Amino acid sequence: MSDLLTLSNVETYYGPVMAIRGVSMTVRTGDVTCLLGANGAGKTTVLKTISGAMEPQKGEILFNGESLKGLAPDVIARRGIAHVPEGREVFAFLSVEDNLKMGAYSRRDSRVASDLALVYDYFPVLRDKRRQSAALLSGGQQQMLAIGRALMLRPQLMLLDEPSLGLSPKLVAEIADIIVRLNQEQGVTVLLVEQNAAMALSRSDFGYVLENGRIVMEDKAAVLADAPDVQEFYLGMKDDGVRGGRRWKKRKTWR
Amino acid sequence: MTDAAANALMIDGEKTVSALFARRVEEDAGKVALREKDFGVWNEYSWADWGERASAVAHGLWHLGLQRGEVCSVAAEVCKEWLFADLGIITAGAVTNGVYPTDASNQVEYLINDSGSTFYFAENEEQLDKVLEVRANTPSLRYIIIFDMEGLRHLDDPMCLSFDALLELGRRHREQAPSMWQESIDQASPDDLMILTYTSGTTGPPKGAMISQRNMLFMMANLTDCLGFDEHDEQLGFLPIAHVAGRMFYVFSLIASRSLVNLIEDPETAMSDLQEVAPSVHFAVPRVWEKQYSMIAIKLKEGTAFGRWAFARALRSGEAIARHALAGERAGLLARARHLLWDKLVLRNVRILLGINSARWLSTAAAPIAPDLIAWYWALGRPMYEIYGQTECTGIATANRPGATRLGSIGKACMETDVVLSEAGEILIRGPGVIAGYWNKPEKTAETIRDGWLHTGDVGRVDEDGYLTIVDRMKDIIITAGGKNITPSEIENQLKFSPFVSDAVVVGDRRPYLTCLVMIDLDNVTKFAQDNNVPFTNYTSLCHAEAVVELIGQEVEAVNSRFARVETVKKFRLIDQLLDAEDEELTPTMKLKRKVVNEKYAELIEAMYR
């Protein structure tokens, strides 16, 4: 399998603050790759940097072997990268269907109508509410709409920023399953940013752990899920110690 | 006994540390003895406070059945309770044994059993869990006392109590027997065992060095004599107290000189606490000095060309002044005037940044250090004195001192201490600081201390003026297949001088050529990779990045150029796993252990000879 996206030593700043500090990672075609990390680790910044919403100060991003350097976000989207932002960011005053059509805004081909049907097949609830304004959807439905909107671009790569945010466990599982289906049935490569590490690792092929703007671990998702540090710090699994209810944290060694 | 010898065994008329401590508590009651930073606030404790806590600890332990001569272990980072407990145990006539907070539970088990500890002081939940894990196998242990009860509110265990509860027990016991503490102190004799300090044996398990009241009192007199402490001095306490050096500087030198120590909030805040405290005298281990140097080296690389130029000029001016100072003379008027300017404009700022601007002197010991590094601090404008000793001679045997310093040497023998070289060149030490032996290990004692002479295992040489220089550890000296004797530490020290190298182990005994395993400095190498667009993900991939290997290669080459051909390192490998103080490869002070590294990375080493 080839590399669809490669980041090499990317640095991105918010003013004087370096948010991501020399991140290098690879997303292979056809994979679901996840990026784990705590609050403020820089996960969202990585996605924003890929989609062009933020300009990296340094480093290189290759998509299909071509540099994305200096390209505007819309150009990057046209190249086939769809960004599903954190907090869904649907167009609140547009109807559900118009939201989905906005996803296909840049497309000139004739398959838009059939893709709309496809999105409705994946998310039947959106078909039921297609005339409603997006603001009236529930959180889970908005997340579905955001993913559906991204799908309307027919992207090669979908960037998903915390799709589980604020959703019930049942909905989280549902959305996660749909992400896997989209990956398998539609061939969409996925880069998934998550705080819900258990969900992300169980659905991914490969994973990275980001801490303080740096990658500290990378491996197959199954291997990561077994690593003691990931279990303790991201999966909330720890032996309770001799006393029961151990509270102190081991030092992170990332191995 | 000569007068000097007698004086060396007495401080202010007292012959034991216990009695001297009691005198300080009485005479300097209101004077501050220590401060500790807690949630950003420096809390003060006077000698009276220290004395009250120590006496309460002693009474509390008596209440729980402590007998004279029993061993109590303490496992904690540097903190006030450590000092309170230490003097409480000692004044109760018992023995303190320090455990490194980084020791794993199986090491804790060994230390408790070997020392026969009956009481165990644990810093917090983490340290408590380690001892609870193994207590089924430590029959001697009776009570566990916990300093910090955070998270342990529901702890209900007949063996455990909080430090505060111990103090309360002690205070009640004291009301019943108000004179007991003083009587116990009066009972102390110079021959009493006072602390056990375990030394990591490279052969066999750790051995407990038995330091007596006399040994310690002599060390205190010696340290004061060599470096000079007075009652106005302030230190920063940041090194582990379980180590003999930490004990010397942050506990017992205070009692000798009535000076004060500021204890850091947390090991992570040590650098900023140092800046804030700006101590008047400062001791650290080479690892810390190397880190400070790297920090400045990296800052300069990032800075402007003008900044680099100015620093180089200022440092050169400082070097000239230092050269004169070391030779015991004064530089010319012009040079001094020029230096005043450079000092004000540049060097002073660097010193403030490092937290050493107010320091009268700096001191280093506990591990080899590159002479160039000492020279660098001299050039910055602060004298640095290297001292030498081992746990087995209570930490100090020779010292460089004001007016008698030779860079690269470990100075001259301290008062009342005989230091000679054996025929094989081994340094032998005799004097009141030399311990009686190892706890319960007569064979080991007989191997190390013969007829009062401590066999240090260090090879040294003496120059014509009597300054001693360490060549290397005797067993570390490499004899290559070609029959050439090589001292690895000399090469390693030069390597560690590089900001990109954290530590290195040179290999080559009975081998055709020298090779080297290098542990990179994570922060600085990461920064290098980032600056130079070297892609990497985790630690392992960083160590395998071609540019990083090349970078370390250049550092190795640079060091090679300073040595003869047979002494050059032909191949090297990076240790590609991030090591932590809890890993057996590292000492608590984050140095590589030669023997463990040789065994653990045998495969990697072999590969360099294929």
Image (spheres, coloured by chain):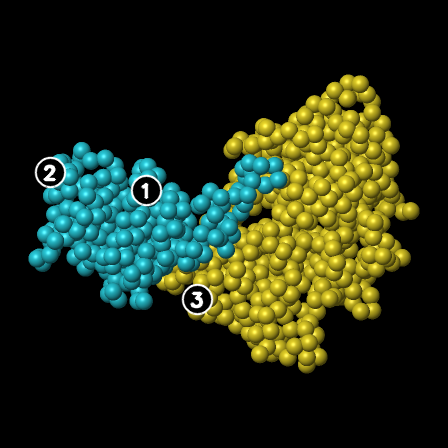
Chain colours: A cyan, B yellow
The Cα–Cα distance between marks 2 and 1, rounded to whole angstroms, is: 25 Å
The Cα–Cα distance between marks 3 and 1, rounded to whole angstroms, is: 39 Å
Contact between labelled residues 1 and 2, with CB atoms less than 8 Å apart: no
Give the camera-side residue of B488 and B341: B488
Give the camera-side residue of A75 and B237: A75
Give the chain letter at badge 3.
B
- Relative to residue B480, is residue A171 depicted above or below? above
Q: Residue furthest bottom?
A: B482
For mark 2, what is the residue? A131
Q: Nearer the viewer, mark 3 or mark 1?
A: 1
In the rendered structure, the answer to whether residue B360 lies left or right of residue A112 reads: right
For mark 3, what is the residue? B545
What is the quadrant of the C terminus of chain B in the image? bottom right
| Residue B11 quadrant | top right
Q: Residue furthest right?
A: B1
Give the camera-side residue of B482 and B67: B67
| Residue B68 quadrant | top right
Kindly identify the residue that appears in the image at 73 percent across and 66 percent down: B475
For mark 1, what is the residue? A172
Three-letter code, disc 2: Arg
Give the chain letter at badge 2.
A
In the rendered structure, the answer to whether residue A74 lies left or right of residue B248 reads: left
Three-letter code, disc 1: Val
- Relative to residue A220, is residue A45 depicted above or below? above
- Same chain assignment for discs 2 and 1: yes
In the rendered structure, the answer to whether residue B421 lies left or right of residue B85 reads: right
Describe the element under mark 1 as helix, strand or loop: helix
